[in-house]
Image (cartoon, rainbow, N blue to C red):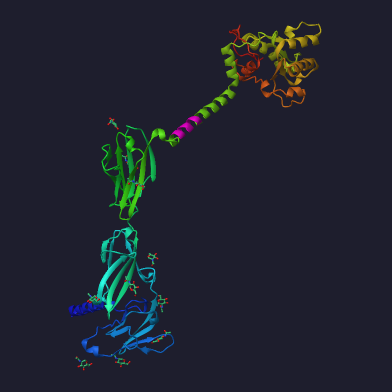
């Protein structure tokens, strides 16, 4: 029983498929001037017996009542079986149509659009289809309803006639376009045509990548004549795509050019990285200024990169990497120079002392002065300034005179008691190259005032002497100093630090030597006398 039922269902399906050309949609659009038909789709195929049953076709337009259609209504219509045919359909034919057979009725809405006069097809009446690239594209010009009456068929692509009436191939992107099947048929001695147009779009394979060449579209490669070059072309592509070089200059092949085999690696997405080398040996003039094209082709199209060899000498611009190198060198030099300047500033004193020593400079020979420095200090030795006194009278001469060979003028030692002290001091200062002031809070007393004034006159007005200020005890308050002393440049002020300044190599003595006039140092007369310089009580 099951088997029997199955047969019935199959028969039914078969019959339905045969009736496919019946008009199942209820809202129909037709193009004016073309043969057109409406065909009722009976659910149960007509049996022979039923052919006798009366069928009715009606039309109703606007508010008018239904009008029965018969061949007499219009010369352009024919009625047979379940079919209403127009030869051809015209704009006036729009409206509602009804079919009735017994209790079985069916209605359609018919719209008529104008024929496109400027094209071989009517754009509003196209069937759009999207076909994936590389998938089957099939266009078959068939019209089941007029099948036996068609005189001839033609297939047009974008209104250009094709040789074949059918297309069956794997889609490529170039296949995209409008395909029109035109059927010619005769009716009552008149020639009619029906146009069926497909709007075919070629879609991208979900698994497909547009093949892409890596690197610039046009590249100039600098070369030298007689040398060789390997041009590496690489691309991301699909399995069946091809990568190759086009390098034939003329018809005769260049024996110096070889195309290597393609190298492929599979990417994680199932695509391929492909590269291919064009090897040019013994580069000659013929190889220059010719575009060597690397091309990748696929079903979806192709992509080309060009490489042109140019002589290195002809490269007008400085290539980028050379420029970078120049920049790096220039920057390095700048860094070194800045470093040297910083070091020079930091070790200025040492450098000057080294220079003086190395060159044996002596600026004391020709100026006609007797002393290298006049030491000005608080003359009275009181308990509160004992250290300062010791420094001026003992340590300073011990280091500067005995160790470094300078000649100091120390009032207590070098000036005879009695006589005109003021004049004496003035002439001694005039005979000295530097004025060393050992500064302490109690320094500003009447006795030294003249020394100061005389020294400042020489220093500031006549510019014959330079002042060195030694800050023996740290001061917080300089207000007691004369205004002119404050104008002294800061590097001319030395700070004595009893714990750090003891060594001959200490910064204090170096700075002091730096401020003292350049003089050839005579070997210390008392090399045996070693530190500490200051013997603490
Ligand atoms: C029938 O289709 C046409 C265009 O094809 C549309 O303008 C019209 O509104 C449709 N009518 C109905 C009743 O769906
Ligand atoms: C089809 O017929 C129309 C007139 O109905 C005519 O204008 C057109 O040129 C014909 N097309 C072809 C391809 O012959
Ligand atoms: C058609 O069917 C009718 C009953 O509906 C029957 O009387 C008649 O004999 C049948 N004719 C043929 C040719 O089978
Ligand atoms: C309605 O149909 C009749 C024929 O049945 C026709 O003469 C008439 O022009 C039509 N009216 C409209 C508005 O289409
Ligand atoms: C048609 O309809 C009537 C009543 O609506 C019903 O009596 C009759 O059997 C139907 N005929 C067919 C063939 O279905
Ligand atoms: C053809 O199909 C494409 C894609 O579906 C669509 O964008 C385009 O508008 C269609 N052209 C016409 C004239 O229907
Ligand atoms: C060519 O280039 C590709 C990618 O840039 C690289 O993987 C390949 O190794 C290169 N071939 C040669 C021979 O250098
Ligand atoms: C390179 O080519 C030149 C001519 O273009 C030829 O004279 C020379 O011998 C060639 N050199 C080699 C190594 O083949
Ligand atoms: C190389 O490609 C360029 C640009 O795509 C093209 O103009 C040229 O004709 C091509 N040359 C060859 C030999 O194919
Ligand atoms: C196959 C076919 O239908 N051919 C017809 C083409 O049209 C001429 C009239 O012009 C008919 O005579 C043919 O039978």
Q: Position of residue 151 (x, y in %)?
A: 25, 74
Q: Quadrant of the C terminus?
A: top right
74 vs 398: above or below: below
Residue depicted at 63% across the width and 17% down the height? 514
Q: Indicate whether residue 530 is drawn in magenta.
A: no
How many numbered marks does the figure carry? 0
The span shown in magenta is: 322-330
Q: Main secondary structure of the magenta part?
A: helix
Q: Position of residue 111 (x, y in %)?
A: 39, 78
Whether residue 313 appears in this view of the structure is: yes
Q: Quadrant of ligand 8?
A: top left
Res. 201 image quadrant:
bottom left
Q: Quadrant of the N terminus?
A: bottom left
Residue depicted at 66% across the width and 22% down the height? 491
466 vs 269: above or below: above
Identify which residue, 377 or 165, lies in the foreground. Answer: 165
Identify which residue, 224 or 508, lies in the foreground. Answer: 224
């Amino acid at each position: 029983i099951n088997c029997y039922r199955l047969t019935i269902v199959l028969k039914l399906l078969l019959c339905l498929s045969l009736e496919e050309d019946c008009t199942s949609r209820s809202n129909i659009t037709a193009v004016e001037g073309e043969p057109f038909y409406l065909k009722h789709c009976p659910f149960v195929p007509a049996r022979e017996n039923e052919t006798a049953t009366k069928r009715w076709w009606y039309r109703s337009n606007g508010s008018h009542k239904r009008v029965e259609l018969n061949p007499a209504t219009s010369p352009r219509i024919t009625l047979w079986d379940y079919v209403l045919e127009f030869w051809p359909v015209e704009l006036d034919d729009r409206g509602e149509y009804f079919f009735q057979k017994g209790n079985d009725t069916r209605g359609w809405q018919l719209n008529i659009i104008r024929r496109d006069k400027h094209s071989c097809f009517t754009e509003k009446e196209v069937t759009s289809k999207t076909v994936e690239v590389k998938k089957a594209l099939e266009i078959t010009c068939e019209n089941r309803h007029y099948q036996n009456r068609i005189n001839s068929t033609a297939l047009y692509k974008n209104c250009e006639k094709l040789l074949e009436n059918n297309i069956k191939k794997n889609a490529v992107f170039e296949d995209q376009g409008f395909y029109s099947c035109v059927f010619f048929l005769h009716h009552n001695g008149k020639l009619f045509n029906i146009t069926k147009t497909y709007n075919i779009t070629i879609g991208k394979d979900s698994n497909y990548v547009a093949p892409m060449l890596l690197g610039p579209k046009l590249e100039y490669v600098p070369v030298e004549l007689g040398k060789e070059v390997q041009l590496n072309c690489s691309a991301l592509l699909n399995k069946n795509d091809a990568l190759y070089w086009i390098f034939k200059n003329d018809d005769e092949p260049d024996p110096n050019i070889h195309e290597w085999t393609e190298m492929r690696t599979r990417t994680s997405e199932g695509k391929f990285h492909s590269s291919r080398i064009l090897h040019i040996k013994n580069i000659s003039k013929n190889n220059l200024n010719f575009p060597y094209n690397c091309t990748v082709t696929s079903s979806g199209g192709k992509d080309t990169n060009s490489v042109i060899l140019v002589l290195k000498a002809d490269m007008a611009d400085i290539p980028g990497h050379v420029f970078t190198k120049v920049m790096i060198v220039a920057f390095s030099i700048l860094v070194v120079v800045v470093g040297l300047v910083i070091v020079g500033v930091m070790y200025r004193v040492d450098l000057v002392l080294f220079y003086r020593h190395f060159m044996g400079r002596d600026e004391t020979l020709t100026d006609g002065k007797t002393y290298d420095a006049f030491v000005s200090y608080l003359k009275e030795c009181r308990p509160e300034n004992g250290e300062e006194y010791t420094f001026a009278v003992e340590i300073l001469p011990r280091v500067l005179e005995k160790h470094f060979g300078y000649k100091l003028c120390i009032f207590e030692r070098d000036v005879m008691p009695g006589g005109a002290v003021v004049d004496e001091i003035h002439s001694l200062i005039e005979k000295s190259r530097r004025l060393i002031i050992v500064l302490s809070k109690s320094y500003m007393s009447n006795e030294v005032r003249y020394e100061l004034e005389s020294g400042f006159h020489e220093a500031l007005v006549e510019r014959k002497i330079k002042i060195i200020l030694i800050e023996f005890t740290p001061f917080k308050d300089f207000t007691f100093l004369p205004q002119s002393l404050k104008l002294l440049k800061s590097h001319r002020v030395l700070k004595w630090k009893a714990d750090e300044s003891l060594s001959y190599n200490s910064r204090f003595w170096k700075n002091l030597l730096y401020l003292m006039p350049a003089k050839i140092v005579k070997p210390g007369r008392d090399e045996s006398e070693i530190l500490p310089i200051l013997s603490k009580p």
